[in-house]
Amino acid sequence: MAKALLGYVGGSDPRVLAEMRRLQQRVQDLESEIVRIQAENDALSAAARHPESVLEGIEGIDVSSAEPALT
């Protein structure tokens, strides 16, 4: 019985290790995506606070007299 317990506790199953590495990589990928999305969200929030700055480079659009889109 002691050998069975030692084998269970002491031995590392390669499938479990491979799955753990895969999950760790997935967590890193998701953390990177969170950082990217947060940066994009910050940029969009800044643009929403100052909509005129988004349209400054576009000629022929007068933001103050813009009409709403058709619904």
Image (cartoon, rainbow, N blue to C red):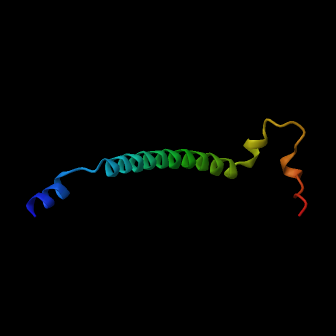
Q: Residue furthest left?
A: 2
Question: Which one is nearer the viewer's eye here, 6 or 30?
Answer: 6
Which image quadrant for residue 28?
top left
Residue beneath the point at 55% across and 49% down:
38
Residue beneath the point at 13% across and 56% down:
6
Quadrant into which the N terminus falls: bottom left
Q: Is 8 located above or below residue 60 in the figure? A: below
Q: Where residue 61 sits: x, y (%)?
A: 88, 43
Residue beneath the point at 20% across and 51% down:
11
Which image quadrant for residue 3?
bottom left
Q: Where residue 4 sits: x, y (%)?
A: 15, 60
Question: Which one is nearer the viewer's eye here, 15 or 57?
Answer: 15
50 on left or right of 29: right
Q: Is 71 located above or below residue 57 in the figure? A: below
Residue beneath the point at 17% across and 55% down:
7
Counting labels gives 0
Quadrant into which the C terminus falls: bottom right
Q: Where residue 31 sits: x, y (%)?
A: 46, 48
Q: Where residue 32 sits: x, y (%)?
A: 49, 44
Question: Which one is nearer the viewer's eye here, 16 or 28?
Answer: 16
3 on left or right of 42: left
25 on left or right of 3: right
Q: Is 61 located above or below residue 71 in the figure? A: above
Which image quadrant for residue 59?
top right
Question: Which one is nearer the viewer's eye here, 8 or 66?
Answer: 8
39 on left or right of 70: left
